[in-house]
Every structure is written in structure tokens, then in C-alpha cells.
């Protein structure tokens, strides 16, 4: 699965990368190179992050359903 970002967010991340290279490494990173790094990272990390988010959401929903079940479940003939 390919993760897509809107152009505004992608530009914000690329600019943050340019700033990081300038401040932390004292190197100039062109906007083109920053965009390529962002694309590379999205392709490499994006799918696993997406899958982890889905797993986390499923776990959260299952816990909430269990809470509802305990709250509304009538005890059997006690």
C-alpha cells in the first residue's frame, strides 16, 4: 500500500528536513533531495506504520466493545 500525503503536508515535511540538515549537519539539502527522501521514507516506513495504526485501532475498539459488554451484560440466573 502506498501512503499519500497532500502536497502542503509533504512540503512542510520536506522543509523540516532541509532545516534539519542545515542546523544539525551544517549541510545544504536541496528541495529536490528533501522531496526524494520524503518519498523514500514514505515508501519504506509508510506501509508498516499504516498496518500498526490499523492494529492499534482494532485493539482499542475490541477493548471498548468488551467494556460495553461488561456494562450491559445481565448476569445469568444468580
Image (tube, rainbow, N blue to C red):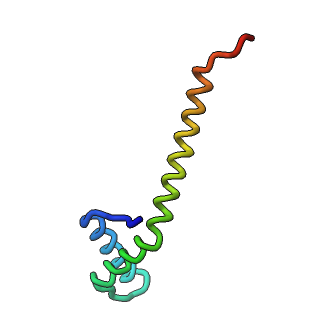
Foreground: 31 or 6?
Answer: 6
- Residue at 70% x, 15% y is 76
> For residue 38, what is the image quadrant?
bottom left
| Residue depicted at 40% across the width and 70% down the height | 42
Quadrant of the image occupied by residue 10: bottom left
Residue 58, given in percent of the width and then of the height, sits at 53, 46
Residue at the farthest top position: 77
Most foreground residue, 8 or 74: 74
Quadrant assignment, res 30: bottom left
Q: Residue furthest left?
A: 8
Quadrant in which the N terminus is drawn: bottom left
Q: Which quadrant holds the C terminus?
A: top right
Q: Residue at x 38, y 65 (%)?
A: 3
Q: Residue at x 33, y 88 (%)?
A: 28
Report the label total: 0
Residue 43 lies, in percent from the top left, at 41, 72
Q: Position of residue 73 (x, y in %)?
A: 61, 20
Q: Residue furthest right?
A: 78
Amino acid at each position: 500500500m502506498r501512503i499519500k500525503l497532500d502536497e502542503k503536508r509533504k512540503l512542510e515535511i520536506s522543509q523540516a528536513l532541509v532545516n534539519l540538515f542545515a542546523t544539525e549537519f551544517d549541510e545544504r539539502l536541496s528541495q529536490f533531495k528533501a522531496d526524494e527522501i520524503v518519498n523514500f521514507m514514505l515508501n519504506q516506513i509508510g506501509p508498516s506504520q499504516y498496518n500498526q495504526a490499523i492494529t492499534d485501532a482494532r485493539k482499542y475498539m475490541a477493548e471498548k466493545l468488551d467494556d460495553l459488554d461488561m456494562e450491559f451484560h445481565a448476569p445469568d440466573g444468580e
